[in-house]
Amino acid sequence: MKNKKSIFKGIAMITQIGISIMVPVFLCLFIGKWLDSLFHTSFITILFLFLGFAAAFRNVYLMTRTFYANDQKREHEEWERMHNMGLERRQYVSEEERRKKEMHDTFEQWKSKREQAEKKENEKRNV
Protein backbone atom coordinates (compact mmCIF):
# COMPACT_ATOMS: atom_id res chain seq x y z
CA MET A 1 0.00 0.00 0.00
CA LYS A 2 2.85 2.36 0.84
CA ASN A 3 4.40 1.68 -2.57
CA LYS A 4 1.14 2.56 -4.35
CA LYS A 5 0.86 5.74 -2.32
CA SER A 6 4.36 6.83 -3.34
CA ILE A 7 3.59 6.04 -7.00
CA PHE A 8 0.46 8.20 -6.91
CA LYS A 9 2.36 10.91 -5.10
CA GLY A 10 5.02 10.86 -7.84
CA ILE A 11 2.42 11.01 -10.62
CA ALA A 12 0.71 13.95 -8.90
CA MET A 13 4.06 15.71 -8.61
CA ILE A 14 4.86 15.23 -12.31
CA THR A 15 1.41 16.54 -13.26
CA GLN A 16 1.80 19.58 -11.01
CA ILE A 17 5.22 20.32 -12.50
CA GLY A 18 3.84 20.16 -16.04
CA ILE A 19 0.97 22.49 -15.22
CA SER A 20 3.27 24.83 -13.27
CA ILE A 21 5.49 25.17 -16.33
CA MET A 22 2.78 25.46 -18.99
CA VAL A 23 0.47 28.00 -17.34
CA PRO A 24 2.96 30.85 -16.77
CA VAL A 25 4.66 30.33 -20.14
CA PHE A 26 1.45 30.36 -22.16
CA LEU A 27 -0.09 33.14 -20.08
CA CYS A 28 2.95 35.38 -20.61
CA LEU A 29 3.08 34.41 -24.29
CA PHE A 30 -0.53 35.47 -24.84
CA ILE A 31 -0.09 38.70 -22.85
CA GLY A 32 3.07 39.47 -24.84
CA LYS A 33 1.29 38.88 -28.17
CA TRP A 34 -1.62 41.04 -27.04
CA LEU A 35 0.73 43.88 -26.01
CA ASP A 36 2.65 43.52 -29.30
CA SER A 37 -0.56 43.86 -31.28
CA LEU A 38 -1.67 46.76 -29.08
CA PHE A 39 1.57 48.75 -29.42
CA HIS A 40 2.55 47.40 -32.91
CA THR A 41 5.91 46.02 -31.71
CA SER A 42 7.54 42.61 -31.96
CA PHE A 43 9.87 42.35 -28.96
CA ILE A 44 7.40 42.37 -26.06
CA THR A 45 6.36 38.77 -26.78
CA ILE A 46 9.94 37.57 -26.38
CA LEU A 47 10.40 39.52 -23.13
CA PHE A 48 7.19 38.11 -21.68
CA LEU A 49 8.12 34.63 -22.88
CA PHE A 50 11.37 34.83 -20.89
CA LEU A 51 9.40 36.20 -17.94
CA GLY A 52 7.04 33.20 -18.24
CA PHE A 53 9.97 30.74 -18.24
CA ALA A 54 11.47 32.44 -15.20
CA ALA A 55 8.15 32.28 -13.35
CA ALA A 56 7.67 28.64 -14.36
CA PHE A 57 11.05 27.51 -13.09
CA ARG A 58 10.58 29.50 -9.90
CA ASN A 59 7.27 27.69 -9.32
CA VAL A 60 8.88 24.31 -9.99
CA TYR A 61 11.74 25.09 -7.61
CA LEU A 62 9.39 26.11 -4.80
CA MET A 63 7.11 23.14 -5.38
CA THR A 64 9.88 20.53 -5.42
CA ARG A 65 11.55 22.10 -2.40
CA THR A 66 8.40 21.70 -0.30
CA PHE A 67 7.69 18.30 -1.84
CA TYR A 68 11.06 16.92 -0.78
CA ALA A 69 11.25 18.74 2.57
CA ASN A 70 9.91 15.70 4.43
CA ASP A 71 12.31 13.38 2.62
CA GLN A 72 15.24 15.62 3.49
CA LYS A 73 14.11 15.75 7.12
CA ARG A 74 13.85 11.95 7.25
CA GLU A 75 17.28 11.56 5.62
CA HIS A 76 18.78 14.02 8.09
CA GLU A 77 17.29 12.13 11.05
CA GLU A 78 18.63 8.86 9.64
CA TRP A 79 22.07 10.42 9.19
CA GLU A 80 22.02 11.68 12.79
CA ARG A 81 21.02 8.23 14.02
CA MET A 82 23.85 6.61 12.06
CA HIS A 83 26.28 9.28 13.29
CA ASN A 84 25.24 8.66 16.89
CA MET A 85 25.67 4.92 16.36
CA GLY A 86 29.17 5.64 15.10
CA LEU A 87 29.93 7.70 18.20
CA GLU A 88 28.64 4.92 20.43
CA ARG A 89 30.78 2.43 18.53
CA ARG A 90 33.84 4.65 18.88
CA GLN A 91 33.16 4.96 22.61
CA TYR A 92 32.83 1.18 22.85
CA VAL A 93 36.06 0.70 20.87
CA SER A 94 37.92 3.21 23.04
CA GLU A 95 36.61 1.44 26.15
CA GLU A 96 37.73 -1.88 24.69
CA GLU A 97 41.18 -0.43 23.90
CA ARG A 98 41.43 0.91 27.46
CA ARG A 99 40.66 -2.56 28.84
CA LYS A 100 43.25 -4.15 26.57
CA LYS A 101 45.83 -1.61 27.67
CA GLU A 102 45.03 -2.29 31.32
CA MET A 103 45.38 -6.04 30.72
CA HIS A 104 48.66 -5.49 28.89
CA ASP A 105 49.98 -3.28 31.70
CA THR A 106 48.90 -5.83 34.30
CA PHE A 107 50.63 -8.57 32.34
CA GLU A 108 53.79 -6.48 32.03
CA GLN A 109 53.77 -5.83 35.79
CA TRP A 110 53.31 -9.55 36.49
CA LYS A 111 56.09 -10.36 34.01
CA SER A 112 58.53 -7.89 35.61
CA LYS A 113 57.73 -9.19 39.11
CA ARG A 114 58.26 -12.76 37.92
CA GLU A 115 61.58 -11.83 36.33
CA GLN A 116 62.68 -10.12 39.56
CA ALA A 117 61.65 -13.18 41.57
CA GLU A 118 63.56 -15.47 39.19
CA LYS A 119 66.58 -13.19 39.41
CA LYS A 120 66.51 -13.32 43.23
CA GLU A 121 66.12 -17.10 43.09
CA ASN A 122 69.10 -17.41 40.77
CA GLU A 123 71.15 -15.21 43.06
CA LYS A 124 70.27 -17.40 46.04
CA ARG A 125 71.32 -20.52 44.12
CA ASN A 126 74.57 -18.97 43.03
CA VAL A 127 75.50 -17.87 46.55
Image (tube, rainbow, N blue to C red):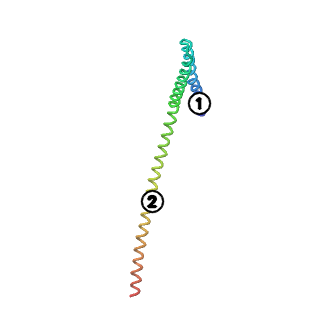
Q: Residue furthest top?
A: 38
Please tell me which residue lies in front, 18 or 74.
Answer: 18
Query: Measured along the vertical axis of the image, is residue 89 above or below residue 55?
Result: below
Which residue was labeled with disc 1?
10
Which labelled disc corresponds to residue 54?
none
The residue beneath circle 2 is 97
Q: Quadrant of residue 56?
A: top right
Is the residue marked by circle 1 packed among few (<14), some (14-19), or many (20+) residues within 10 Å? few
Which of pointers 1 and 2 indicates the residue nearer the eye? 1
For label 2, the SS is helix
Task: Give the residue type that dot 1 points to.
Answer: Gly
User: Is 37 drawn above or below residue 55 in the view shown?
Assistant: above
Give above or below for 101 relative to 88.
below
Residue 66 location in percent, x, y?
A: 50, 30
Q: Which percent across, then down, holds residue 44?
A: 54, 18
Direction from residue 90 to residue 25 in the image, left or right: right
Q: Quadrant of the N terminus?
A: top right
- Residue 65 or residue 100, whichever sits in front: 65
Q: Who comes first in sequence, dot 1 or dot 2?
A: 1
Q: Quadrant of the C terminus?
A: bottom left
Q: Position of residue 64 (x, y in %)?
A: 53, 30
From mark 1 to mark 2, how far is it between C-alphas? 49 Å
Q: At label 2, which amino acid type do we have?
A: Glu
In the rendering, at what x and y percent does residue 25 appear? 56, 22
Q: Secondary structure at mark 1?
A: helix
Q: Quadrant of residue 22?
A: top right
Residue at 45% x, 58% y is 96
Image quadrant of residue 110? Answer: bottom left
Q: 32 or 106, which lies in front?
A: 32
